[in-house]
Amino acid sequence: MLAIIIVMLILKRFENKIKLKPEIVEDLWHLEKVIKPGDLVSGESDRKFTTESGKSERVPVKVKLQVEKVEFHKPSGALKVLGIIVEGSPEEYVQLKAHHSLEIGQFDIVTIEKEWKKYELDRLKEAERGSRREKVFVLIIDERDAEFFVIREFGIETLGKIHCESRGKYTGEGKDVQNQYYKMIVDLISKKEGKIVIAGPAFEKDNLYDYIKDKDQKLSKRIVVESTSNTSGQGVYELLTKGTLDKILLESRFAEETKAVDRFITEVSRKNGKATYGLENVERALDMKAVDELLVLDNLLMDKRELIEHLLDKAEKIRAKVMIVSHENEVSQKLKGFTGVAALLRFNIE
């Protein structure tokens, strides 16, 4: 047996089987991108069983499914694998060839059997690295509203919003309202562990930071203050596309996808830019060994698996980087506008 020494996610590997233990929500999201129809997935579940007295009970079982569909449910943080039972135990409670859904959560152990592609193994290694990263939170603030976000591997998620009633800037009453506004914000953000970026237009972000520094020195040391012209979620995307969060996020999947699509948009808009898009053009560029990075929407990988994996195999042979862009990432809509398949080039092929 070949053991893979990875602290969190991959427990062991033998031939085409990999045993996994997802530790964080992002691990489950990565697995959704790796598990495909036709793969075999094993794990613990339960089956409904009717006793002789007519009473219904749920019995714990171990099942192996041939996958038909896989869904990651962000609100609950669970991965649901739907398929047909091909093996199971105890045998008296498992009906072979029956449809079943296997729900995988954090810390559940699951085994995946398949012909592994390089990009899929790379994805698992990336998930393991991601589990070690410090969480990054962003507070976008102006005089009226403060919205708090966490940056996950699959995009930005809102954690709460605080609204402040209108206040007079130079009156004692206005100062009290401002302090109450700031206190509610501190109550919201201080419960989270990780780096916190406070950003927004004008001076409200600086005023809030001064308040925090005066009230909570420990919290202030985890805070970075930045400027944005946008508010709400658009302010977070502004920080990402400007590269402001690069040092904090390091190799965050979400940041990498955002920057890769942004680089493509920049190149394709230039005269003689080193970029191309569309299945035929990208395949031609791959045949010419001109592709430096291949960008593919994850939806296409599910809908046109054989065709897209043909491109991925060609990319692997010429050692081009592969970026599977999540449809949950807002920038995916830009890539979708260019057919969902694009390439950044090593040299111009026109």
Image: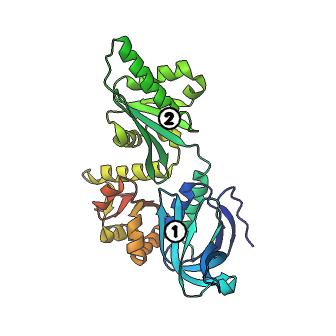
| Quadrant into which the N terminus falls | bottom right
What is the x, y in percent for residue 245? 46, 39
Question: At 41% from the left edge and 32% from the top edge, which residue is drawn?
Answer: 199
The image position of residue 12, as x and y in percent, is 70, 67
Circle 2 is placed at which residue position? 188
Q: Which mark is residue 80?
A: 1
Please name the residue shown 53% across and 21% down the image. Answer: 213
Is 68 located above or below residue 290 in the figure? below
- In percent of width and height, residue 340 lies at 33, 64
Give the left or right position of residue 184, taking residue 217 as reference: left
- Pinpoint residue 166: horizontal percent, then vertical percent: 31, 24
> Residue furthest toward the left?
271
Colouring convention used in this rendered image of the protein:
rainbow
Is residue 117 visible from the viewing direction of this image?
yes
Examine the rendering and report whether any part of residue 288 can be seen.
Answer: no
Q: Amino acid at mark 2?
A: Leu
| Secondary structure at numbered mark 1 | strand
Q: Secondary structure at mark 2?
A: helix
Viewer-proximal residue among 101 and 299 = 101
Q: Give the crowd class for mark 1: few <14, some 14-19, many >=20 residues within 10 Å.
A: some
Residue kind at label 1, given as amino acid type = Lys
Which numbered circle lies on residue 331? Answer: none
The reply, left or right, for residue 128 in relation to residue 212 is: right
Question: Residue shown at 33%/55% (left/top)?
Answer: 274
Question: Relative to the observer, which residue lies in front, 299 or 337?
Answer: 299
Q: Which residue lies at the image location 62% right of the left edge and 56% below the top edge?
A: 23
Q: Residue furthest front?
A: 53
